[in-house]
Amino acid sequence: MKILEKLIHQNIDGRIIALFGIANILVIGAVIFIVAQLYKLENSVQTLSNDVTETITVLSPIFKDLEFVSSNLVKIGEKSNLTYINLRKTKKLHAKLLKYPHNAQKLDKLLESLGIFNKKALLNIQSVRLLIDDSKRKTDESGGNFRVIEQQLTSLQKISQLEKTIAFIRNNIILALLGIILLGSLSSFGLFILIKKSHEITQQRLKAEFATTEAKLALKAKEAADIANKAKSTFLASMSHELRTPLNAILGFAQIMRRSPTLPQEHQENINIINRSGNHLLSLINDVLDMSKIEAGKITLDEHDFDLHHLLNEVRDLFYLKAESKRLQLQIERDESVSRYIRTDGTKLRQVLINLMGNALKFTEEGGVFVFVDEIPTLTEETTLRFSVRDTGAGIAEGELEKLFEAFAQTATGRASQEGTGLGLPISRQFVQLMGGDIIVQSEIGNGTVFEFSIRAKIVSAAKIVNQHPARQVIALEPNQPRYRILIVDDKRDNRQLLIQLLNPFGFELREASNGQEAIDIFENWQPHLIWMDIQMPVMDGLQATLRLKVLPNGQNVAIIALTASVVKEEQDKILAAGCDDFLRKPFKEADIFELMHKHIGVRYIYEQVKGTEPQQSAQDISIPDALAALPDELLAQMRQAAITLEIESMPSLIEQVRPYNKPLADALLELANNLQYDQLQALIQQAQASTLKGLNVNSPRCNLG
């Protein structure tokens, strides 16, 4: 719109300037024309004046003679005895009159006008008249005409008057020209003001029209954006439900099968493959859903307190085996000033580091990957953390750097590898920007790539860090508890069966419903203690059912926990606003199910006791970390990597390598692995590594954290 408005303004201004120029040209042309005409007229008058002057010069002697005659005639009249006229002078007059045309009658009138009344004078005059008549006759014979004298006299009077007029015009021509120019300028200025005013009115009208049009377009754009965002939200909710729900069944039933003591070893390996593939698929789905949330503006920060040093250790161990398999160095170094306990979104920070380091290792064949962390302290509790991830890989072409952070965009190397979704870097940039920073990249073909990013964080004390112990496996319910009634509401039979098979062995009284209306009917007759409520269902969804249940008698006493595949925060807010007491995102872990039941209805459990689950409580328990510390460094790192990445199929074979060193230790570790207590395995191995400072050699593929 601004470009169009500018063009219109330029067009109007151009027309104003053009009209102003034309007006001035016309005025100047008129002035030049008038001056030329005056000059021409002056020349003509000057020529005529010269001719008349010449005539007057010739007639001047004649007028003198006529004056003499007139004077003598007066004298004749006064004396009354004049008898003759000086013939000599008359002859001279006659001679001069012969040179020019004359008219006797005119002469008579002239003589009469002189006042001659004496009779004698008249007689004498008649004698003179005879002489004049004789001269007339002779003059007529020569072709003269006395009218010329009259015409010349008349012309002389007119020329004299015209000379005065021309002299006046000539004397005042400058003032006239200035007046004309001033008049033209005033006319042009008036025209300019008129056009300018018209331009301003047109401009105001156009601005008003543009403003109205812009407002309409903005409203339409907003409506379109709202529709698009609503469509994205709908798509996000739908895809989240459609993708994560079946994964919930896959991973959930795999966990249940792992609990079976009679499962053959070959089936155990198959279950491990299912778990591994399912978790990999879940990570890809999470990337797509994260990108959808970002585009829909639904992504938010989940800030919490955590140990940054511990997070760096976890990320290092996550990539250790991959670096070792490619014979690459992997170093993570931090400046001594880097704070240990901070508050920010640790989950997103971890994901950013995983994305950047994963790409670096993927596209590096020689050399290594080097991470450095430093801190820019401030006088407040807030600080800025800077991270640098450098690799010695093939590098990225300059033309591809601009598209590097576009969704689904991949470099030539990435396309050749046929790995990844092209979402890791766009998601990483969005996460970093949410945490108050930004990410930049520098690369050169053949010289590797450097990613740098910074985030804002708040420094906290160690006392605020919650010490989370690894989850323990539930083996039974404590005695002397009521028999809890649990209602499972889900339109998918597989999802209902998952919870039934998980909870039924512990003695819970269970019922199931396929929609919200059935849940209400069962509640009125059965009064359950807790309801696991799916959200998206036919007939009546979980939100409507919860709203109606909470207003029924005893409705406030029942605990309703929503099971949702949605990853959108607004959806979670709706769940809580509808009256649900809590929610659990699919796919879930069995430990989360038991924990929420304990939280909301007070169910107490008996946990499986495994040596080393709480290594700080007794010397006997500490023997497992001590025994682990005696293992080879490489084997210990591989086991920790498998525990972090849930490498269920490779962990048993790694534990078997422990048996030659310490059989009781191998049995204890295998029991933990069979019970899927990988968090406990990770904690024990980490404690063993920390106690001996293993895995921190700068020259090894593992990093040096100082």
Image: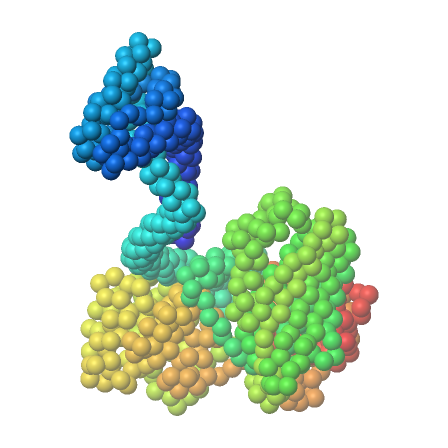
Can residue 381 be spotted in the picture? yes
> In the image, residue 489 lies at what x, y percent?
30, 69
> Residue 329's quadrant in the figure?
bottom right
Judge by depth and name the residue closer to the eye, 307 or 225: 225
> In the image, residue 120 lies at what x, y percent?
20, 29
Left or right of residue 386: residue 147: left
> In the image, residue 325 lies at what x, y percent?
73, 56
Q: Residue furthest right?
A: 699
Task: Give the image's coloring scheme.
Answer: rainbow
Q: Residue at x 69, y 65 (%)?
A: 388
Number of on-image labels: 0
> In the image, residue 217 lies at what x, y percent?
32, 55
Q: Residue at x 46, y 83 (%)?
A: 605
Judge by depth and name the residue closer to the eye, 694 or 157: 157
Vertical order, 461 against 592 (above or below): below
Judge by depth and name the residue closer to the eye, 467 or 631: 467
Left or right of residue 348: residue 238: left
Q: Residue at x 46, y 62 (%)?
A: 294
Can residue 643 be spotted in the picture? no
Vertical order, 689 against 318 (above or below): below
Left or right of residue 623: residue 602: left
> Residue 350's quadrant in the figure?
bottom right
Vertical order, 308 against 443 (above or below): below
Q: Residue furthest top?
A: 141
Left or right of residue 588: residue 493: left
Locate the C terminus and report the quarter of the image it occupies. Answer: bottom right
Q: Residue at x 66, y 48 (%)?
A: 398
Judge by depth and name the residue closer to the eye, 48 or 107: 107
